[in-house]
Amino acid sequence: MPSPFMEALRQHMLTRHYGKRTVDSYCYWIRYYIRHAGRRHPADLGQSDVLEFLGFLANHRQVSVATQKIALNALAFLYNKYLHIPLGDLGAFNKANRPRKLPVVLTREEVGVLLGRLRGSTGLLVSLLYASGLRRIEAVRLRVSDVDFDHLQLRVWAGKGNKHRITTSAPELVPALQRQRARYA
C-alpha cells in the first residue's frame, strides 16, 4: 500500500497533467531514494543526500547515463516543484559512464521477413509502427478518423509530451487500413 506522502505526490503530478509513465517513473525513483536514505522523509534530507544517491547509482548500481538522468529529474521535481526546497547546483555528482550499447538494426530483408509473418490486426499494427514511425501507444490509440487516405497521413493526438503531430502512412498499408475501417464502420 502506498504511503500517504507518495499518494499525494502522485496526485500532484497527475493534476498537473504529467504522463502516466513519467509519474510511475518518478515515483519509482523517489521511493528508491527514500529507501536508500533509511526511509527518512525527503524534507529531512538535502543536496548532499541527493548527490550521494546519484553517486550510488553510478558506482554501485552502475546505471546508464540516461537512467541516472531520470533519477535526477525525479528528485529535482520532488524538491523544486513539490516540496519547494531548492536543491541548488547539483553539478558535482559522480556521473554514470557506462557506455551505451549500439542498437541492433534489422536489414530491410529481415524486416520484410518479420512483417511477412505477421497477419491481421497485429501485422497492421507492427507495419504502422515501422512505416509511420508511430510509438506503440500512438498506434493503439489511432482512430479511423485519424487516417487521411487522400494525403497518406495519420494524425496523432496527445502523443509523447501530450503533443499532436501528423505523420505519413505507407501507400502499401492503405488496403489493410481500409479493410480495418470497414470492419468498424
Image (cartoon, rainbow, N blue to C red):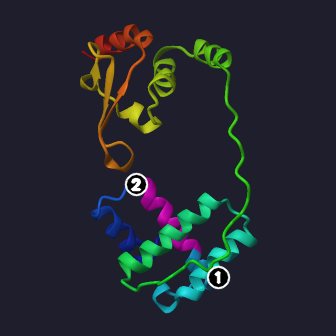
Magenta range is 20-32
Residue at which label 1 appears: 52
Secondary structure mostly taken by the magenta-highlighted segment of the chain: helix
x, y percentage for residue 7?
39, 71
Would you say 93 lies left or right of 79 here? Answer: right
Would you say 142 lies left or right of 107 here? Answer: left
Q: Which residue occupies the foreground of this view, 172 or 12?
A: 172
Q: Badge 2, how many Cα within 10 Å: few under 14, some, many 20+?
A: few
Q: Secondary structure at mark 2?
A: helix
Q: Residue at left 32%, top 22%?
A: 153
Magenta stretch contains residue 21:
yes
x, y percentage for residue 50?
57, 81
Residue 20, labelled with which disc?
Answer: 2
Q: CA distance from mark 1 to mark 2?
A: 28 Å
The image shows residue 116, relative to residue 155, as above or below, that is above
Q: Is residue 1 visible?
A: no
x, y percentage for residue 169?
39, 20
